[in-house]
């Protein structure tokens, strides 16, 4: 079979998996509708449903009317705004890390973790190639973010003061920049007028490459953001080399407009958890790992691409065949998760050999890593794969999907199985338990947040970019 035919086959298999996932979600929601319809609450709800629909329609109309233009997906008739000329770039003098979005909206997700840990490292007193510090935007001006950095363990430096933009400054949009371009436009102009550059962090291309894995609101917002970011940014920093390569290939393949000479680079996330393992976890956490049965841990939001259904199918097969082991799922509810959530909560092994915790803190997560036999990561799309590095730092092996970014992060220190193949996962677990497959965590990527921060600064200061687009 040719390489192209093999890729086509894999794409078809992935589409079939996504269709099967959405079909299961639809069947679950249909079942819930029938259950409500034929219950007392269903009869009450029947009269409220038209009112709810009218309110929802009115809310959507109001939201669409007031929605900022930057959030609306470009249509076929829209044209790209002209790219304004800027002064020739000077050598990097300082790195100003924008944390405005995280200060305003800290949802506790992976993006906010990256922002806080990188900023924590930059304010730890360690010297880098150029000064790097957190800033926030207010009324078109930049200020220090002293309260924010102090809360992360940095030295308290008093009241916030305005930051005067200097020649050669680099402005890093490390935080969530969905809605930031208009707010930061005056800053961009000042930065470029003084020979500086705008650098945007990109976490993944999943909404572009796998739109059916995302919430319906995310895809148009991301599409608008990416096209705006390509025009506003002088450079992109991806959280993995894989994402950097995907971005360069995608922009070229789609012919997306961008700033001339757009630079694309990468760094890799750290994984040292701020909190040590708790010595006294809650009873439900301790009970989940009690006993001699091997424990397998999954960490990640409950959403389609994370592979929870694949894991549950694999464990069902192993349990039916008499294999004694436990599966612990750690993660908040995400989107399109109703069917898999119900499947776990109503599973006959739930609370016995299957556990799901949505409220675990860093200390308890470290505790679970320490008591796990291995980490499972059956995702079919990721931007990095942070749990692989977290597991490695706790000395735990990983069994994960065979996708490029996991190969980058897991290297020779992980066990790989076919993407979205429950039978292959079950077989890999059997072989692991029998000692036929082994993985040395020391051979997986092991990066600290201090190293991640240093890499970010070095890429910018030394112009160590992976590629430059025409």
Image: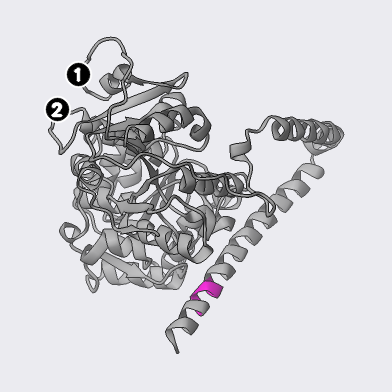
Residue 43 visible at all: yes
Which residue in the protein does label 2 denote?
A: 125
The label number, if any, that marks residue 155 in the structure image: 1
| Front-lying residue, 112 or 336 | 112
Left/right placement of residue 155 relative to residue 341 reads left
Query: Where does the N terminus fall, quadrant-wise?
Result: bottom left
Label 2, secondary structure: give it.
loop
* Other residues around mark 2 within 10 Å, as few (<14) / some (14–19) / many (≥20): few
Residue at 52% from the left image edge and 78% from the top image edge: 8
C-alpha distance separating marks 1 and 2: 9 Å
| Residue range highlighted in magenta | 9-13
* C-beta proximity under 8 Å, tags 1 and 2: yes
Q: Horizontal and vertical percent for residue 148?
A: 32, 21
Residue at 19% from the left image edge and 42% from the top image edge: 454
Placement of 165 over or under 227, stated as above or below = above
- Give the dominant element type of the magenta stretch: helix, strand or loop: helix
Q: According to the image, what is the colour scheme of the structure?
A: one colour
Query: Where does the C terminus fall, quadrant-wise?
Result: bottom left
Residue at 35% from the left image edge and 65% from the top image edge: 404
Q: Horizontal and vertical percent for residue 407?
A: 30, 65
């Amino acid at each position: 079979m040719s390489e192209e035919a093999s890729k086509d086959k894999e794409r078809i298999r992935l589409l079939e998996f996504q269709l099967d996932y959405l079909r299961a979600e639809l069947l679950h929601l249909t079942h819930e509708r029938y259950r409500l319809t034929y219950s007392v609450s269903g009869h009450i709800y029947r009269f409220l449903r038209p009112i709810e629909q009218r309110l929802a329609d009115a809310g959507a109309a109001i939201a669409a009317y007031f929605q900022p233009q930057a959030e609306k997906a470009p249509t076929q008739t829209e044209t790209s705004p002209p790219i304004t000329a800027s002064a020739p770039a000077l050598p990097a003098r300082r790195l100003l890390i924008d944390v405005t979005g995280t200060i305003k909206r800290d949802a506790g997700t992976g993006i906010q973790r990256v922002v806080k840990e990188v900023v924590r490292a930059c304010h730890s007193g360690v010297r880098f190639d150029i000064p790097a510090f957190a800033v926030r935007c207010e009324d078109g001006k930049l200020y220090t973010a002293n309260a924010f950095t102090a809360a992360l363990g940095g030295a308290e430096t008093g009241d916030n003061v305005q930051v005067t933009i200097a020649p050669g400054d680099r402005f890093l949009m490390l935080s969530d920049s969905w809605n930031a371009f208009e707010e930061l436009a005056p800053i961009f102009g000042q930065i470029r007028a003084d020979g500086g550059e705008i650098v945007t962090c990109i976490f993944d291309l999943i909404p572009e490459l796998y739109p059916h894995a995302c919430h319906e609101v995310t895809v148009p917002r991301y599409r608008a953001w990416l096209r705006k970011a390509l025009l506003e940014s002088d450079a992109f920093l991806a959280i993995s080399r894989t994402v950097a390569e995907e971005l360069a290939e995608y922009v070229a393949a789609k012919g997306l407009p961008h700033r001339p000479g757009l630079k694309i680079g990468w760094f890799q996330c750290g994984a040292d958890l701020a909190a040590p393992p708790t010595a006294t976890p809650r009873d439900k956490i301790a009970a989940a790992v009690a006993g001699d049965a091997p424990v397998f841990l999954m960490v990640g939001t409950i959403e389609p691409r994370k592979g929870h259904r694949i894991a549950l199918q694999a464990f069902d097969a192993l349990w039916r065949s008499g294999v004694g082991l436990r599966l612990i799922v750690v993660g908040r509810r995400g989107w399109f998760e109703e069917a898999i959530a119900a499947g776990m909560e109503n599973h006959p092994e739930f609370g016995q050999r299957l556990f799901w915790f949505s409220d675990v803190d860093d200390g308890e997560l470290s505790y679970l890593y320490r008591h796990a036999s291995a980490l499972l990561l059956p995702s079919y799309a990721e931007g990095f794969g942070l749990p692989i590095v977290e597991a490695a730092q706790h000395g735990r092996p990983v069994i994960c999907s065979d996708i490029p970014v996991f190969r980058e992060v897991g290297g020779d220190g992980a066990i790989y199985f076919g993407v979205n193949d429950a039978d292959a996962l079950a077989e890999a677990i059997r072989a692991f338990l029998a000692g036929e497959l082994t993985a040395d965590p020391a051979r997986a990527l092991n990066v600290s947040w201090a190293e991640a921060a240093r890499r970010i600064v070095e890429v910018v200061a030394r112009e160590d970019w992976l590629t430059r687009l025409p």
